[in-house]
Image: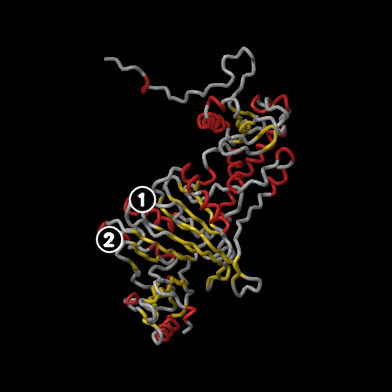
Amino acid sequence: MNPELQPPPNTLWCICCEGVSWSDFENHMNEWSDYAYVGKGALKNVYPRNFVGLMLYVFQSVDGDKLCIVPQCKVQPMREQLNVCEQDGLSRGSHIVLFHSQSGNRLVSIICADAYHEDIKSAGIFFPSNQDYKNIVLHPQLNSDPRNKDIAALRNRMFEEERGRHTLYITANWAHGTSIGIAHQPDTTIRIKAPWSSIYKRNVNYSRKEMDEILHDVRVKNFKFGLGFAFAERTKLKVWYAVKYEHLQMISLRKPYAGGPELTRPAGTVQASESYIPNESNDGWKEEEIKFDSTLPEVLAREATGDFDYPRRASVDDLDRFLSYCLGYIDGNELLLDDEEMSNRLSYHIDDDCEIHRGHQISNVVRLIHCLKQLAHHKYPSPIRRIQGGFKFDLVDKNSHYNIISKQPRVRAGALVAFVERENDAKQRAYQLIEKCGEYNYSDKICVFSYKPYTTEIIHYPQHNDDVTAIERVEKKPDYSQGGHSIEPTFD
C-alpha cells in the first residue's frame, strides 16, 4: 500500500463511497484485512441484500502502525415511489459509529436518508442522558432537495435545544449537474440543481450588525474560495455555503467550544484556505480560486444604464447593500436566510432554488428604475427634486444610507429611494426606514415607490408638503393602534 495515499497520524479520513454489491463489499473487506485493521463491529446485524451504501473511516491509531478501516452502512433507505431501489435492495446497517475525545468533542456521520430514521430524527441519540455534547455531525447526501423541511428537521431539532448550542453540522451534497437514472424507471432521473452543501453553527454572541462587522474579513477571504455566508435570524444559525459546481475546498473548522471564556475566542469558526476545480482533461484537479457567478439578470443589465447604472466597481458586499437599499432594507438584509434557507443575496447566483427569489427581487429593482424614468423632473418627490445638479445611482459609504447622489462631484446631497410591491407595505416600509435611519436626518430624504393596486399609477411615501407655510413638511407616521373594547375606559 502506498503511504502517500494514506492519512498521516492523528488524522481521520471520512470517505463517502458509491454503492457496491454486497458480495463486492465483502471481497474488499477481505482484501483490506491483509493490510489494515478492519473494524467490523458496526456491521453487526446487517441484513445482506443486493447492495450496500456506506462510508469509510480511515486512520492510523499509532504512527507507523497499520491502517484502521471502519465501515458504516446506511441504516435508512431513501424515499422512492416504486420501491425498486433502496427500499428492496439496500443492505441496512444498525449502528452509527461515534468518535469522541475526553474534551467532549464527538464526530458522528449520518448518511443521506439516515436523517429519517426513527431513532435519529428526534436528535435524542446525539445527547445521551440529556447531556450537552459537542457534536460534529457530517451529513453526506445525494439529494435533489437539500432544503426540504424533512431533511432539515434533524439539524433544526439539534440546534433549537440549549444542549445543541455547540453543535457543528456539515452537509456535503453532489455537485450541480449530477444526473442519476433510476433502475426500472427510464423516465425518472434525479438531478442536482441546488446542492446547498453547507456548514451550520449556532450563533451565540453576535447581533446581525456585529456579525457583519466582526466576520467581514473572514467572509471576504472565504468568498474567494467559493464559500458564501448567511445568517438564519429566527434559528440563530450561521451558515457557510459552497459554490454549486464541482470543486474541492480546504477548510479549517474550529472544534466545538471546549471550555474557557467564550467571549475571548477569535472570530471565524470556518476558514477556507485553498480551492480546486477539475483540470482541462477532467482527470485531476488544479488549484484555483472559485468565484460565484456574479452575472446580474439581463432585465437589470438592460435597464441599468447611464444615471441608473449600479456601482459596477463595488465589492460584493457593497453591491448587495446597494441593491438592498433599492428594496427598502438598510440593516444587513442581504446576509439573511429565510425559514426555507433561501438567501437574500442579489449580486451573485447561488443555485437554481435561490435564483427564483433573486429574480423576483431584481425585478423590483427594475421597477424602481422604471418609476424614476417615467416621472418628469417636476413630478419627482421633493427628496429627489432638491438634489442639486440632478441625481445618479451610487453608494457613499456604510454610514450613509443614500443610493442616489448628486451628479455634481462637489455637491454632498442624496436620498434613499426604494420600490415595494404593495402600497400598504410601501407606506409602512417608508416609516420604518425613517425610524431606523433617524428622523432628524432622513425624514425628508427617503422615498419609497409603489403602484396603485391593479394600475400602473406611481405612488410614493412618505407624503411631502413643500408649501412654505406647512407646519409639517413630511406626513407623520400614521397611528396603527386598533380601536374597540380594549381601549374603552373602565368604570367602577
Give the residue number, with chain letter if any, for mark 2: 128
Tell me the element at label 2: helix
Residue at left offset 32%, top offset 66% = 101
> Quadrant location of the C terminus?
top left
> What amino acid is at disc 1?
Glu
> What amino acid is at disc 2?
Pro
Instruction: For marks 1 and 2, give the CA distance.
Output: 24 Å
Q: Position of residue 302 (x, y in %)?
A: 72, 45
Q: Is residue 453 visible?
A: no
Can you name the residue that lies furthest to the top here? 469
Q: Nearer the viewer, residue 289 or 488?
A: 289
Q: Is residue 147 visible?
A: yes
Residue at left offset 31%, top offset 62% = 103
Can you name the residue that lies furthest to the left here? 129
Whichever of callouts 1 and 2 sits on the residue coming sooner in the sequence is 2
Q: Nearer the viewer, residue 391 or 60?
A: 60
